[in-house]
Image (cartoon, grey):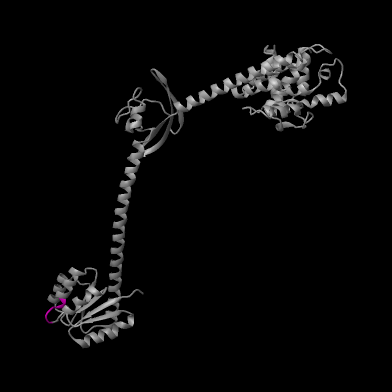
Amino acid sequence: MDDRKLLLVDDETNILKALKRLLRRDGYTILLANSGEEALQLLPENKIGVIISDHRMPAMTGTELLAEVKNLYPDITRIVLSGFSDIDSITEAINQGNIYKFLAKPWDDAEIRTTVQEAFERFELRAENTRLAEELKQANIILKQENIETSSLLEQMVNHNRDAIIVVNQERKVIFSNPSALSLLVDHYRVLEGDQFVMPFQEDQIMQQRLERSGRPDLLLEVRSVTIKHEGEPAFLVTLHDISAIEYIYEQKQNAEANLSKIIQQILRVINANIEKIDSYTALHEERVSCLAAAIGEQLELSDGEIDGLKVAGLIHDVGKLYVPLDVLNRPGPMTEAERLVVQQHTEVGDKLVSKVDFPWPIQQIVGQHHERLDGSGYPLGLSGEQIILESRIMAVADVVAAMDSSRPYRSACPREEIFSMLRQGSGTKFDSEVVDACIRVIEEGSLS
């Protein structure tokens, strides 16, 4: 139990002592005063919860004392104890002191103990309510200040945001637009409050909108829309992000990559032209494989960058054969087992040669894997399935077809039906079936020169 202070006021010392003996068993801290003046002196220094005052006292009556206490310390619970129970005394005490209870002398011990207990509970409840009310008041002050600060911060964030921010109602009328919206759309749409917002947008989706500008590149906007509540009604928050610069950078990057691919291909063709003076078949074969691989890539709808990689890889996929003796490469009859092993090393040699160049495509893998087969029967590592990248699977088919379609000292070019038969027999086992189908379509459409 918290410290409960009880002030007893009576001009008769015996009554004070009797009350003290009765009430101290309930654990109260009891203060005594023989007059109203003495009681008032005790109040500032002590947190009194309950006052029991005699009604009839000289100099200052109990009614006058409790009226003063009401003015100075309104939370204190006030009880009048009097031997005069006439109605006028009770009315005066109630009107002036706003007392909690009026007890008559002689008192009933149980009644007075219960009354004091209830009086303290009343005091503590009022004190707790007062404390909570003050805390709520302070919390409201802080919350109000925080709301003001948050509102100011949000206003600055919205008004200084480079993205256009627009709120429209269900009828597509503009409710709000920030300065960026006004400047960004000034040549195309009105977005002042009350204007009809006619720029298309999809509810809760992201889309792009291109706006033409006279004498300047087009304005490309990313349009986002989310459903919100405005004053209790459904509305749409539309944000517009200018991605024109991103598109420009992307286009520049694509152009740079395309130019780089062209330069690399031109350099490789110059190298192949010199190789042709030594080994005409290998040089021409590289060119044909490059063209066929790129055509297959187009059939498979690969990206421009992936197709550029196929073109470059095709031009150097057999670069390792520069280290194979020409008499082995160009001999008219079948190779011996030893010669075959020497030729097969060209994939590993080529892998090492191109590893020294930082290509923007997987050239090293393509050169090193173009003799691998889907079923693991290829070389040099016996890779299978998805271990072989798609570009290598394309190069494998293009390499075989270009070789069969070319005349060699020891045989003529194979007929188209023989090439198709070889492809179909190996489809799904040695060769990727989608790549085989794409290659056959290329040949049937006349893309293979």
Q: Please count the marks in the image.
A: 0
Q: Nearer the viewer, residue 270 or 234?
A: 270
In the image, taking residue 219 as reference, residue 43 lies left or right, namely left
Q: Position of residue 269 (x, y in %)?
A: 67, 16
Q: Nearer the viewer, residue 210 or 304?
A: 304
User: Which quadrant: the C terminus?
Assistant: top right
Q: Position of residue 75 (x, y in %)?
A: 24, 68
Q: In the image, what residue occupies the spot 48% across and 24% down?
A: 248
In the image, taking residue 241 as reference, residue 59 lies left or right, namely left
Quadrant position of residue 32: bottom left
Q: Nearer the viewer, residue 104 or 267?
A: 267
Q: In the image, what residue occupies the spot 20% across and 87% down?
A: 13
User: Which quadrant: the N terminus?
Assistant: bottom left
Q: Position of residue 239 (x, y in %)?
A: 40, 33
Q: In the image, what residue occupies the spot 14% across and 74% down?
A: 64
Quadrant position of residue 407: top right
Quadrant position of residue 52: bottom left
In the image, taking residue 215 as reference, residue 118 lies left or right, namely left
* Residue 172 seen in render: no
State which region is magenta: 58-63
**Residue 122 belongs to the span the image colors magenta:** no
Q: Is residue 442 above or below residue 137?
A: above
Main SS, magenta region, reads loop
Q: Is residue 238 above or below residue 448?
A: below
Q: Is residue 266 above or below residue 2?
A: above
Residue located farthest toward the bottom when viewing the structure as drawn: 14
